[in-house]
Amino acid sequence: MKSLLFCILFVFSMSCKHTSKEVGARLNQEAHASQEGIVSGFLEVPENRSVKNSKTIRLAYRVLKAKGDSPKEDPILYLQGGPGGATLIMQNFWSNNALRADRDIVLMDQRGTGESNAICSDLGARLIQILSMDLTPEEEEVKILEATERCKKEAVAQGTDLSGYNSRENAADFEALRKKLGYHRWNILGGSYGSRLGLTIMRDFPNSVRSSILFGIFAPDSEIYTHFISNFNTALMAAFEECGEDPDCNIRYPRVKARFFEALKQLEKEPISFSYNGEPFVLNVQDALLVAHQLLYQKRMIGFLPAYVEALNKRDPDGLRQALGPTTATVNFINFAMYMSVMAYEELPFNGTLEFSKDLERHPEFSTGPAFFNSDPKALENWHSFRAKAHEDQPVVSNIPTLIANGRLDPITPASNAVELSKNLKNSYYMEFKRDGHSLFNSCFFETCRAFLDSPQERPDLSCAAKSGPIPWE
Protein backbone atom coordinates (compact mmCIF):
# COMPACT_ATOMS: atom_id res chain seq x y z
CA MET A 1 0.00 0.00 0.00
CA LYS A 2 1.08 3.59 -0.06
CA SER A 3 2.76 3.35 3.30
CA LEU A 4 5.46 1.86 1.14
CA LEU A 5 5.74 5.35 -0.23
CA PHE A 6 6.33 7.10 3.03
CA CYS A 7 7.97 4.71 5.38
CA ILE A 8 11.63 5.50 5.98
CA LEU A 9 13.50 2.22 5.69
CA PHE A 10 15.60 1.99 8.82
CA VAL A 11 17.98 -0.62 7.47
CA PHE A 12 20.12 -0.39 10.60
CA SER A 13 17.20 -1.49 12.81
CA MET A 14 16.92 -5.23 13.41
CA SER A 15 13.28 -4.66 14.33
CA CYS A 16 12.39 -4.23 10.67
CA LYS A 17 12.93 -7.97 10.28
CA HIS A 18 9.99 -8.71 12.53
CA THR A 19 6.26 -8.32 12.10
CA SER A 20 4.50 -5.48 13.90
CA LYS A 21 2.89 -8.05 16.22
CA GLU A 22 6.29 -9.45 17.22
CA VAL A 23 7.69 -5.95 17.73
CA GLY A 24 4.72 -5.03 19.89
CA ALA A 25 5.17 -8.08 22.10
CA ARG A 26 8.85 -7.33 22.60
CA LEU A 27 8.16 -3.68 23.42
CA ASN A 28 5.53 -4.67 25.95
CA GLN A 29 8.13 -6.77 27.77
CA GLU A 30 10.74 -4.03 27.63
CA ALA A 31 8.32 -1.39 28.94
CA HIS A 32 8.30 -3.13 32.31
CA ALA A 33 12.07 -3.39 32.53
CA SER A 34 14.05 -0.92 34.63
CA GLN A 35 16.55 0.85 32.40
CA GLU A 36 19.03 3.46 33.53
CA GLY A 37 18.50 6.86 31.95
CA ILE A 38 15.17 5.90 30.37
CA VAL A 39 11.73 7.00 31.53
CA SER A 40 8.84 4.87 30.23
CA GLY A 41 5.13 5.40 30.54
CA PHE A 42 1.72 5.69 28.94
CA LEU A 43 -0.26 8.78 27.98
CA GLU A 44 -4.05 8.60 28.03
CA VAL A 45 -5.79 10.73 25.40
CA PRO A 46 -9.23 10.91 23.78
CA GLU A 47 -9.47 8.77 20.67
CA ASN A 48 -11.34 11.61 18.95
CA ARG A 49 -11.24 15.06 20.50
CA SER A 50 -14.04 16.29 18.22
CA VAL A 51 -16.48 13.74 19.66
CA LYS A 52 -18.07 14.37 23.05
CA ASN A 53 -17.32 11.66 25.61
CA SER A 54 -14.90 9.90 23.26
CA LYS A 55 -13.25 6.83 24.70
CA THR A 56 -9.61 7.12 25.70
CA ILE A 57 -6.60 5.29 24.27
CA ARG A 58 -3.17 4.67 25.77
CA LEU A 59 -0.01 5.80 23.98
CA ALA A 60 3.36 4.33 24.93
CA TYR A 61 6.32 6.70 25.28
CA ARG A 62 9.95 6.65 26.31
CA VAL A 63 12.28 9.49 27.25
CA LEU A 64 15.97 8.81 26.73
CA LYS A 65 17.58 11.19 29.21
CA ALA A 66 20.58 13.19 28.02
CA LYS A 67 23.90 11.54 28.77
CA GLY A 68 25.85 14.71 29.58
CA ASP A 69 26.23 16.34 32.98
CA SER A 70 24.65 19.62 31.84
CA PRO A 71 21.64 18.72 29.68
CA LYS A 72 19.81 21.47 27.84
CA GLU A 73 16.21 22.17 28.76
CA ASP A 74 14.81 21.68 25.25
CA PRO A 75 14.64 18.00 24.21
CA ILE A 76 14.42 16.47 20.74
CA LEU A 77 11.06 15.00 19.77
CA TYR A 78 11.53 12.34 17.11
CA LEU A 79 8.57 11.84 14.75
CA GLN A 80 8.46 8.58 12.82
CA GLY A 81 7.47 8.19 9.18
CA GLY A 82 4.66 6.14 7.71
CA PRO A 83 1.92 7.02 8.38
CA GLY A 84 1.79 3.99 10.62
CA GLY A 85 5.44 3.42 11.49
CA ALA A 86 6.17 2.43 15.08
CA THR A 87 8.65 4.62 16.94
CA LEU A 88 9.85 2.83 20.06
CA ILE A 89 11.73 0.31 17.94
CA MET A 90 14.18 3.18 17.33
CA GLN A 91 15.25 3.21 20.98
CA ASN A 92 18.62 1.51 20.44
CA PHE A 93 19.48 3.84 17.57
CA TRP A 94 18.70 6.99 19.52
CA SER A 95 20.31 5.66 22.70
CA ASN A 96 23.72 5.90 21.04
CA ASN A 97 23.14 8.92 18.83
CA ALA A 98 25.40 11.94 19.34
CA LEU A 99 22.35 14.20 19.63
CA ARG A 100 21.60 12.57 22.98
CA ALA A 101 24.81 13.96 24.48
CA ASP A 102 23.15 17.09 25.81
CA ARG A 103 19.44 16.71 25.07
CA ASP A 104 16.73 14.27 26.07
CA ILE A 105 15.31 12.25 23.16
CA VAL A 106 11.53 11.79 23.31
CA LEU A 107 9.93 8.83 21.54
CA MET A 108 6.27 7.87 21.43
CA ASP A 109 4.46 5.30 19.34
CA GLN A 110 1.90 7.35 17.43
CA ARG A 111 -1.74 6.43 17.88
CA GLY A 112 -2.57 3.26 15.99
CA THR A 113 1.02 1.98 15.94
CA GLY A 114 3.27 -0.26 18.01
CA GLU A 115 2.18 -0.23 21.65
CA SER A 116 -0.26 2.65 21.10
CA ASN A 117 -3.61 1.13 20.25
CA ALA A 118 -2.32 -0.75 17.20
CA ILE A 119 -5.04 -2.03 14.88
CA CYS A 120 -4.90 -5.13 12.64
CA SER A 121 -1.23 -5.72 13.31
CA ASP A 122 -1.22 -8.78 11.02
CA LEU A 123 -2.44 -6.96 7.91
CA GLY A 124 1.10 -6.52 6.59
CA ALA A 125 1.58 -10.28 6.47
CA ARG A 126 -1.64 -10.63 4.47
CA LEU A 127 -0.41 -8.05 1.97
CA ILE A 128 2.88 -9.86 1.49
CA GLN A 129 0.90 -12.97 0.59
CA ILE A 130 -0.95 -10.94 -2.04
CA LEU A 131 2.34 -9.57 -3.37
CA SER A 132 3.69 -13.11 -3.79
CA MET A 133 0.86 -14.11 -6.16
CA ASP A 134 0.95 -13.65 -9.92
CA LEU A 135 -1.98 -11.24 -10.15
CA THR A 136 -2.93 -8.61 -12.67
CA PRO A 137 -3.29 -5.08 -11.22
CA GLU A 138 -7.07 -5.58 -11.33
CA GLU A 139 -6.89 -8.92 -9.50
CA GLU A 140 -4.48 -7.46 -6.97
CA GLU A 141 -6.93 -4.65 -6.24
CA VAL A 142 -9.69 -7.14 -5.48
CA LYS A 143 -7.46 -9.03 -3.05
CA ILE A 144 -6.31 -5.85 -1.33
CA LEU A 145 -9.87 -4.59 -0.95
CA GLU A 146 -10.84 -7.93 0.60
CA ALA A 147 -7.96 -7.77 3.09
CA THR A 148 -8.56 -4.16 4.11
CA GLU A 149 -12.30 -4.71 4.39
CA ARG A 150 -11.67 -7.58 6.78
CA CYS A 151 -9.38 -5.34 8.84
CA LYS A 152 -11.97 -2.56 8.93
CA LYS A 153 -14.65 -4.95 10.19
CA GLU A 154 -12.31 -6.13 12.93
CA ALA A 155 -11.49 -2.55 13.95
CA VAL A 156 -15.12 -1.41 14.00
CA ALA A 157 -16.13 -4.50 15.96
CA GLN A 158 -13.58 -3.53 18.60
CA GLY A 159 -15.11 -0.05 18.86
CA THR A 160 -12.36 1.82 17.01
CA ASP A 161 -13.32 5.29 15.76
CA LEU A 162 -11.36 5.44 12.49
CA SER A 163 -12.11 9.15 12.09
CA GLY A 164 -9.81 9.86 15.05
CA TYR A 165 -6.66 8.65 13.33
CA ASN A 166 -5.29 11.70 11.51
CA SER A 167 -2.43 14.19 11.77
CA ARG A 168 -4.45 16.78 13.69
CA GLU A 169 -5.25 14.32 16.49
CA ASN A 170 -1.73 12.94 16.29
CA ALA A 171 -0.25 16.41 16.79
CA ALA A 172 -2.53 17.04 19.76
CA ASP A 173 -1.28 13.81 21.32
CA PHE A 174 2.27 15.10 21.29
CA GLU A 175 1.22 18.44 22.77
CA ALA A 176 -0.43 16.51 25.60
CA LEU A 177 2.80 14.53 26.04
CA ARG A 178 4.88 17.72 26.19
CA LYS A 179 2.68 19.05 28.98
CA LYS A 180 2.80 15.78 30.89
CA LEU A 181 6.59 15.63 30.70
CA GLY A 182 6.90 19.28 31.77
CA TYR A 183 8.94 20.59 28.85
CA HIS A 184 8.46 24.27 27.99
CA ARG A 185 9.47 23.84 24.35
CA TRP A 186 11.08 21.13 22.29
CA ASN A 187 12.88 20.63 19.00
CA ILE A 188 11.12 18.54 16.35
CA LEU A 189 12.99 16.05 14.18
CA GLY A 190 10.81 14.23 11.65
CA GLY A 191 11.14 12.70 8.21
CA SER A 192 8.72 11.49 5.55
CA TYR A 193 5.27 11.42 7.20
CA GLY A 194 7.08 12.67 10.30
CA SER A 195 7.70 15.92 8.40
CA ARG A 196 3.95 16.32 7.83
CA LEU A 197 3.24 15.60 11.48
CA GLY A 198 5.97 18.04 12.49
CA LEU A 199 4.49 20.76 10.30
CA THR A 200 1.06 20.08 11.81
CA ILE A 201 2.52 20.58 15.29
CA MET A 202 4.19 23.80 14.12
CA ARG A 203 0.84 24.97 12.74
CA ASP A 204 -1.37 23.99 15.68
CA PHE A 205 1.06 24.46 18.60
CA PRO A 206 3.70 26.96 17.43
CA ASN A 207 4.60 28.17 20.91
CA SER A 208 5.68 24.66 21.87
CA VAL A 209 8.38 24.39 19.18
CA ARG A 210 11.85 25.90 19.59
CA SER A 211 13.14 24.63 16.23
CA SER A 212 12.45 21.86 13.71
CA ILE A 213 14.45 19.55 11.50
CA LEU A 214 12.46 18.07 8.63
CA PHE A 215 13.58 15.75 5.83
CA GLY A 216 11.97 13.72 3.04
CA ILE A 217 9.34 16.44 2.91
CA PHE A 218 5.68 15.41 2.77
CA ALA A 219 3.94 18.68 3.61
CA PRO A 220 0.16 19.00 4.10
CA ASP A 221 -0.14 20.67 0.69
CA SER A 222 1.86 17.95 -1.12
CA GLU A 223 -0.34 16.01 -3.53
CA ILE A 224 1.29 12.63 -3.65
CA TYR A 225 -0.81 10.98 -6.37
CA THR A 226 -0.66 13.83 -8.86
CA HIS A 227 3.00 13.26 -9.68
CA PHE A 228 3.62 9.81 -8.21
CA ILE A 229 4.79 8.08 -11.42
CA SER A 230 6.69 11.18 -12.56
CA ASN A 231 8.57 11.43 -9.27
CA PHE A 232 9.44 7.74 -9.37
CA ASN A 233 10.60 7.97 -12.97
CA THR A 234 12.74 11.06 -12.30
CA ALA A 235 14.52 9.44 -9.36
CA LEU A 236 14.99 6.12 -11.18
CA MET A 237 16.45 7.74 -14.30
CA ALA A 238 18.75 9.91 -12.19
CA ALA A 239 20.02 6.81 -10.37
CA PHE A 240 20.71 5.09 -13.69
CA GLU A 241 22.55 8.23 -14.85
CA GLU A 242 24.67 8.16 -11.69
CA CYS A 243 25.69 4.61 -12.56
CA GLY A 244 26.49 5.61 -16.13
CA GLU A 245 28.70 8.46 -14.94
CA ASP A 246 30.61 6.25 -12.52
CA PRO A 247 33.41 4.45 -14.44
CA ASP A 248 33.27 1.28 -12.34
CA CYS A 249 29.48 1.02 -12.34
CA ASN A 250 29.28 1.74 -16.08
CA ILE A 251 31.80 -0.99 -16.88
CA ARG A 252 30.12 -3.57 -14.65
CA TYR A 253 26.55 -2.64 -15.64
CA PRO A 254 26.50 -1.16 -19.17
CA ARG A 255 23.17 -0.03 -20.60
CA VAL A 256 21.53 -0.38 -17.17
CA LYS A 257 18.55 1.79 -18.09
CA ALA A 258 17.88 -0.10 -21.35
CA ARG A 259 18.31 -3.44 -19.62
CA PHE A 260 15.80 -2.47 -16.95
CA PHE A 261 13.08 -1.87 -19.54
CA GLU A 262 14.11 -4.99 -21.44
CA ALA A 263 13.57 -6.96 -18.24
CA LEU A 264 10.12 -5.42 -17.76
CA LYS A 265 9.14 -6.44 -21.30
CA GLN A 266 10.23 -10.01 -20.59
CA LEU A 267 8.32 -10.05 -17.29
CA GLU A 268 5.14 -9.10 -19.15
CA LYS A 269 5.51 -12.32 -21.12
CA GLU A 270 6.83 -14.55 -18.36
CA PRO A 271 6.95 -13.68 -14.62
CA ILE A 272 9.73 -15.18 -12.49
CA SER A 273 8.89 -17.91 -9.95
CA PHE A 274 11.16 -18.70 -6.99
CA SER A 275 10.99 -19.33 -3.24
CA TYR A 276 11.14 -16.51 -0.73
CA ASN A 277 11.38 -17.20 3.01
CA GLY A 278 10.35 -20.77 2.29
CA GLU A 279 7.20 -19.80 0.39
CA PRO A 280 6.43 -19.61 -3.37
CA PHE A 281 6.82 -16.13 -4.86
CA VAL A 282 6.00 -14.95 -8.39
CA LEU A 283 7.59 -11.66 -9.46
CA ASN A 284 5.68 -9.85 -12.21
CA VAL A 285 5.96 -6.39 -13.75
CA GLN A 286 4.26 -4.41 -10.99
CA ASP A 287 6.26 -6.30 -8.35
CA ALA A 288 9.51 -5.47 -10.16
CA LEU A 289 8.58 -1.79 -10.23
CA LEU A 290 7.74 -1.83 -6.54
CA VAL A 291 11.12 -3.32 -5.66
CA ALA A 292 12.92 -0.71 -7.77
CA HIS A 293 10.92 2.02 -6.04
CA GLN A 294 11.92 0.76 -2.59
CA LEU A 295 15.60 0.44 -3.50
CA LEU A 296 15.64 4.19 -4.10
CA TYR A 297 14.87 4.95 -0.47
CA GLN A 298 18.38 4.70 0.96
CA LYS A 299 21.83 5.33 -0.46
CA ARG A 300 23.21 1.87 0.23
CA MET A 301 20.19 0.26 -1.42
CA ILE A 302 20.51 2.54 -4.46
CA GLY A 303 23.93 0.97 -4.85
CA PHE A 304 22.24 -2.40 -5.35
CA LEU A 305 19.90 -1.14 -8.09
CA PRO A 306 22.11 -2.09 -11.10
CA ALA A 307 22.71 -5.55 -9.59
CA TYR A 308 18.95 -5.89 -9.25
CA VAL A 309 18.52 -5.05 -12.94
CA GLU A 310 21.01 -7.82 -13.76
CA ALA A 311 19.14 -10.24 -11.50
CA LEU A 312 15.93 -9.44 -13.39
CA ASN A 313 17.54 -10.08 -16.77
CA LYS A 314 19.29 -13.25 -15.63
CA ARG A 315 16.22 -14.33 -13.66
CA ASP A 316 18.52 -14.95 -10.70
CA PRO A 317 16.54 -16.00 -7.58
CA ASP A 318 19.33 -15.10 -5.13
CA GLY A 319 19.62 -11.55 -6.42
CA LEU A 320 15.85 -11.14 -6.48
CA ARG A 321 15.49 -12.40 -2.92
CA GLN A 322 18.07 -9.89 -1.76
CA ALA A 323 16.30 -7.06 -3.59
CA LEU A 324 12.93 -8.00 -2.09
CA GLY A 325 14.16 -7.56 1.49
CA PRO A 326 13.52 -3.80 1.86
CA THR A 327 10.02 -4.11 0.42
CA THR A 328 8.84 -6.90 2.70
CA ALA A 329 10.50 -5.25 5.72
CA THR A 330 8.49 -2.10 5.05
CA VAL A 331 5.21 -3.98 4.66
CA ASN A 332 5.80 -5.71 7.99
CA PHE A 333 6.85 -2.46 9.65
CA ILE A 334 3.78 -0.36 8.93
CA ASN A 335 0.39 -0.39 10.65
CA PHE A 336 -1.84 -0.13 7.60
CA ALA A 337 -5.00 0.78 9.50
CA MET A 338 -3.33 3.95 10.80
CA TYR A 339 -1.83 4.61 7.40
CA MET A 340 -5.13 4.30 5.55
CA SER A 341 -7.03 6.40 8.08
CA VAL A 342 -4.56 9.29 7.75
CA MET A 343 -4.26 9.14 3.97
CA ALA A 344 -7.98 8.71 3.29
CA TYR A 345 -8.68 11.75 5.45
CA GLU A 346 -5.85 14.02 4.28
CA GLU A 347 -5.04 13.07 0.68
CA LEU A 348 -8.19 11.77 -1.02
CA PRO A 349 -10.13 15.05 -0.78
CA PHE A 350 -7.45 16.70 -2.88
CA ASN A 351 -5.96 14.02 -5.18
CA GLY A 352 -6.51 10.34 -5.84
CA THR A 353 -7.27 7.75 -8.50
CA LEU A 354 -7.86 10.19 -11.38
CA GLU A 355 -4.63 12.08 -10.78
CA PHE A 356 -2.64 8.86 -10.45
CA SER A 357 -4.07 7.50 -13.72
CA LYS A 358 -3.33 10.72 -15.60
CA ASP A 359 0.26 10.70 -14.42
CA LEU A 360 0.67 7.06 -15.45
CA GLU A 361 -0.60 7.94 -18.93
CA ARG A 362 2.18 10.53 -19.19
CA HIS A 363 4.70 7.68 -18.94
CA PRO A 364 3.95 5.05 -21.59
CA GLU A 365 7.27 3.38 -20.80
CA PHE A 366 5.47 1.93 -17.76
CA SER A 367 2.65 -0.48 -18.60
CA THR A 368 1.47 -0.22 -14.98
CA GLY A 369 2.42 1.37 -11.71
CA PRO A 370 4.26 -0.43 -8.89
CA ALA A 371 2.40 -3.18 -7.06
CA PHE A 372 -0.08 -1.90 -4.43
CA PHE A 373 0.13 1.69 -5.68
CA ASN A 374 -2.31 1.11 -8.54
CA SER A 375 -5.06 0.08 -6.13
CA ASP A 376 -4.07 2.33 -3.26
CA PRO A 377 -6.54 5.19 -3.87
CA LYS A 378 -9.41 2.73 -4.27
CA ALA A 379 -8.53 1.00 -1.00
CA LEU A 380 -8.46 4.36 0.74
CA GLU A 381 -11.85 5.32 -0.72
CA ASN A 382 -13.35 2.17 0.80
CA TRP A 383 -11.60 2.48 4.14
CA HIS A 384 -13.71 5.28 5.60
CA SER A 385 -15.74 8.26 4.41
CA PHE A 386 -14.18 10.94 6.62
CA ARG A 387 -12.50 13.69 4.61
CA ALA A 388 -10.52 16.75 5.68
CA LYS A 389 -11.60 20.29 4.91
CA ALA A 390 -9.51 22.63 2.76
CA HIS A 391 -7.57 23.82 5.81
CA GLU A 392 -5.63 20.55 5.88
CA ASP A 393 -4.41 21.11 2.31
CA GLN A 394 -2.94 24.55 2.91
CA PRO A 395 0.80 25.28 3.17
CA VAL A 396 2.14 25.74 6.68
CA VAL A 397 3.59 29.23 7.09
CA SER A 398 5.93 29.72 10.02
CA ASN A 399 8.92 31.66 11.36
CA ILE A 400 10.10 28.79 13.55
CA PRO A 401 13.78 28.11 12.73
CA THR A 402 13.82 25.02 10.54
CA LEU A 403 16.50 22.88 8.90
CA ILE A 404 15.11 21.22 5.75
CA ALA A 405 16.86 18.34 3.99
CA ASN A 406 16.06 16.12 1.01
CA GLY A 407 17.70 13.61 -1.27
CA ARG A 408 17.83 14.28 -5.01
CA LEU A 409 17.09 10.61 -5.72
CA ASP A 410 14.02 10.48 -3.46
CA PRO A 411 11.29 8.64 -5.45
CA ILE A 412 8.30 9.65 -3.31
CA THR A 413 8.97 13.00 -1.63
CA PRO A 414 11.07 14.77 -4.26
CA ALA A 415 13.44 17.63 -3.58
CA SER A 416 10.92 20.01 -5.16
CA ASN A 417 8.71 19.45 -2.09
CA ALA A 418 11.51 20.72 0.13
CA VAL A 419 12.17 23.73 -2.07
CA GLU A 420 8.49 24.70 -1.95
CA LEU A 421 8.38 24.27 1.81
CA SER A 422 11.40 26.54 2.27
CA LYS A 423 9.43 29.37 0.62
CA ASN A 424 6.79 29.19 3.35
CA LEU A 425 9.19 28.77 6.27
CA LYS A 426 10.91 32.14 6.20
CA ASN A 427 13.48 31.21 8.84
CA SER A 428 14.65 28.00 7.20
CA TYR A 429 17.81 26.53 5.69
CA TYR A 430 17.79 23.88 2.96
CA MET A 431 20.39 21.21 2.24
CA GLU A 432 20.16 18.71 -0.63
CA PHE A 433 22.01 15.42 -0.86
CA LYS A 434 22.76 14.74 -4.52
CA ARG A 435 23.24 10.97 -4.24
CA ASP A 436 20.75 10.11 -1.51
CA GLY A 437 17.17 8.92 -1.64
CA HIS A 438 14.39 9.16 0.92
CA SER A 439 16.32 8.39 4.11
CA LEU A 440 19.12 10.77 5.13
CA PHE A 441 20.46 9.21 8.30
CA ASN A 442 24.16 9.83 7.66
CA SER A 443 27.01 11.52 9.52
CA CYS A 444 26.77 14.77 7.55
CA PHE A 445 23.07 15.09 8.33
CA PHE A 446 23.51 14.53 12.06
CA GLU A 447 26.54 16.80 12.32
CA THR A 448 24.53 19.57 10.69
CA CYS A 449 21.57 18.84 12.96
CA ARG A 450 23.70 19.25 16.06
CA ALA A 451 25.16 22.57 14.89
CA PHE A 452 21.71 23.83 13.99
CA LEU A 453 20.20 22.82 17.35
CA ASP A 454 22.93 24.71 19.19
CA SER A 455 22.23 27.94 17.27
CA PRO A 456 18.96 27.65 15.28
CA GLN A 457 18.89 31.38 14.51
CA GLU A 458 22.22 31.16 12.68
CA ARG A 459 22.77 29.59 9.29
CA PRO A 460 24.60 26.27 9.76
CA ASP A 461 27.41 25.08 7.53
CA LEU A 462 25.60 22.99 4.89
CA SER A 463 28.61 22.26 2.72
CA CYS A 464 29.06 18.62 3.72
CA ALA A 465 25.88 17.69 1.80
CA ALA A 466 27.53 18.68 -1.47
CA LYS A 467 30.62 16.66 -0.54
CA SER A 468 28.76 13.46 0.29
CA GLY A 469 30.50 10.40 -1.07
CA PRO A 470 29.64 8.31 -4.12
CA ILE A 471 26.93 5.69 -4.21
CA PRO A 472 28.43 2.33 -3.07
CA TRP A 473 27.65 0.27 -6.17
CA GLU A 474 27.54 -3.46 -5.51
Image (cartoon, rainbow, N blue to C red):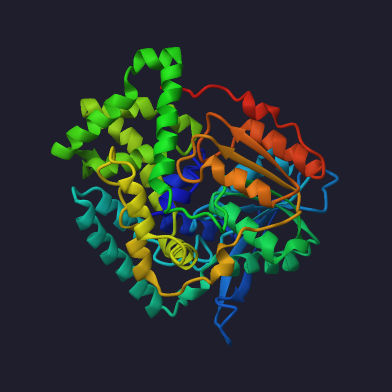
Tell me where residue 233 appears, x and y as whole percent. 39, 38
Q: Residue furthest bottom?
A: 53
Q: Which residue is at 23% across, 62% downward?
A: 142
Q: Which residue is at 36% across, 68% downward?
A: 381
Q: Is residue 94 shown left or right of residue 434?
A: right
Above or below residue 393? Residue 269 is above
Q: Which residue is at 45% across, 76% downward?
A: 160
Above or below residue 330? Residue 31 is below
Tell me where residue 264 appears, x and y as whole percent. 24, 35
Q: Nearer the viewer, residue 271 or 425?
A: 425
Q: Is residue 317 shown left or right of residue 216?
A: left
Residue 52 falls in image quadrant: bottom right
Tell me where residue 310 appears, x and y as whole percent. 29, 25
Q: Residue furthest left?
A: 269
Number of marks in the rendered image: 0
Q: Is residue 473 visible?
A: no
Tell me where residue 351 appears, x and y as whole percent. 43, 60
Quadrant of the image containing the C terminus: top left
Q: Nearer the viewer, residue 448 or 416?
A: 416
Q: Nearer the viewer, residue 194 or 326?
A: 194
Q: Which residue is at 50% across, 36% downward?
A: 437
Q: Is residue 345 visible?
A: yes
Quadrant of the image containing the N terminus: bottom left
Residue 305 falls in image quadrant: top left
